[in-house]
Amino acid sequence: MREAVRQEVGDYQMYHARRTEFATADTVPFHVADEPLRLSSELHDDMERLGVELSAFMTAADELYHTDEEAAALLDRGKPEIFRRERAAKQPFIRPDLIITEDGFAVCEIETSPFGLGLAYALNTAYRAEGHETIVNGELAHHLDSVLPDSGSLVYSDKTKAYAGQLGYLEERLFSANGRDWALREAAEAAEEGGTSGEAIYRAFYLHEYGTDPAVRELIEQGEAAEGDWTPSLTPHLEEKALMALLWDDRWEAYFRRELGDAGYKYLQSVIPPTWIVGEEEHFTPGLPGGVSDVEDIAGLPRPQRALVLKSSGYDRHGSWAESVELLHTKSQVEAGRLLVEAAARDDSLQIVQEFRRGTKIPMTYTENGTTRTDEVRVRLTPYVDPTTGRIIAAKATGRTGTDFIHAASDSVNAAVGVR
């Protein structure tokens, strides 16, 4: 299958390693499973329901931001004024990151960025070309036909250039399909050209780069001056992991129960692990673990009671690609305490703590250079969901062994998704 994926992507490298020791010219620099990861019918049904319920949740969260001053003030923490303007949400898809556990799915993140979308499409296309059944068949292409304008620029930054190959593949195969005329550009190039004169820009960079990358800053300011068409929209509140914490916050429980219905609210709480915003513990409905009252006291709990993940919520230079993720149960009490104290002292961005849910081990088999191997891996599913219908339009699976950090590294096993 790896060769089939290579044939599909051509000269486009699906990921360029940021660390020099993993650098390679291989266009598919990781393992590819011999067959799709096949979900049970129960898990497949659950993933389809999740798409619908999560779409409703994101709509409700956006409405809460625009109508509740306390929620807006919280989600605006650390953000410059340019991102606090009234804007309509525009996300072509939402992508929950799902860990497969013994008890079903656990949602560890909700993304709206296009990173990984090219790989999901390439894997699905290659597997189907080899005769495998998968859970999607052309949905992504049809969806983009309905949401993309006739022309525009797909823009990446210096930080996200590791995905330039995937983005080039997307631009050629999907963005410029059916008579559309799109171009792939780096932010510095686009800014030099005057912000592409107000044309449509598909944003393949993070909004927090506004504060760290002069080219991104200039491009956003040019685009705003020209009333440019941004996709995803410049709405960083919808890119905060802290949205998950709102489901566990007593200030907005009644709101979400009303907007989602009691069944939908309870369902999302069953798949989104208990999560709170550091500094807002008094509103965390389950209460802190071990009966402690201060977040810093969590460090003194036995490791099983501090099976927790600390991470930046979103608008932070380390808020992407697991750069800020800390597994508190793997740290010493001293180190865990230091991390929690530092998180509590920050007022420039939101920090969250989420209950840790460990993935169950699943066998994934791959063949390379004539040798077949099966690894017992923990799996992260990434379905891409149409936010207007909740329908799954793309999906992929990534497995890794020997770690709880599951992403498309050189030792990962990647696959399209099917049903048993």
Image (spheres, rainbow, N blue to C red):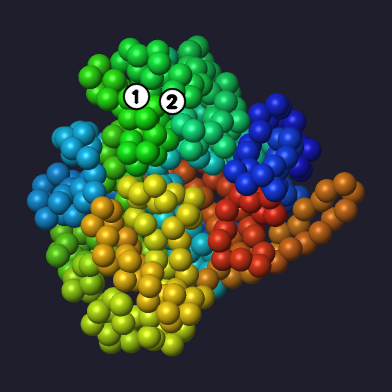
Name the secondary structure under disc 1. helix
Find the distance from the CA under tag 1 to the CA under tag 2: 7 Å
In the displayed structure, does residue 123 sit left or right of residue 86? right
User: Does residue 127 appear anywhere in the picture?
Assistant: no
- Judged left or right of residue 380, residue 69 is left
Q: Are marks 1 and 2 in contact (CB under 8 Å)?
A: yes
Q: Residue at x 57, y 26 (%)?
A: 168
The quadrant of the picture occupied by the N terminus is top right
Q: Secondary structure at mark 2?
A: helix
Residue identified by numbered label 2:
187
Q: Amino acid at mark 2?
A: Ala
Nearer-the-camera pick, 226 or 339: 339
219 shown above or below 305: above
Q: Residue at x 29, y 20 (%)?
A: 222
- Which of pointers 1 and 2 lies earlier in the amino acid sequence? 2
**Residue 420 position by quadrant:** bottom right
Residue 73, image x, y percentages: 15, 51
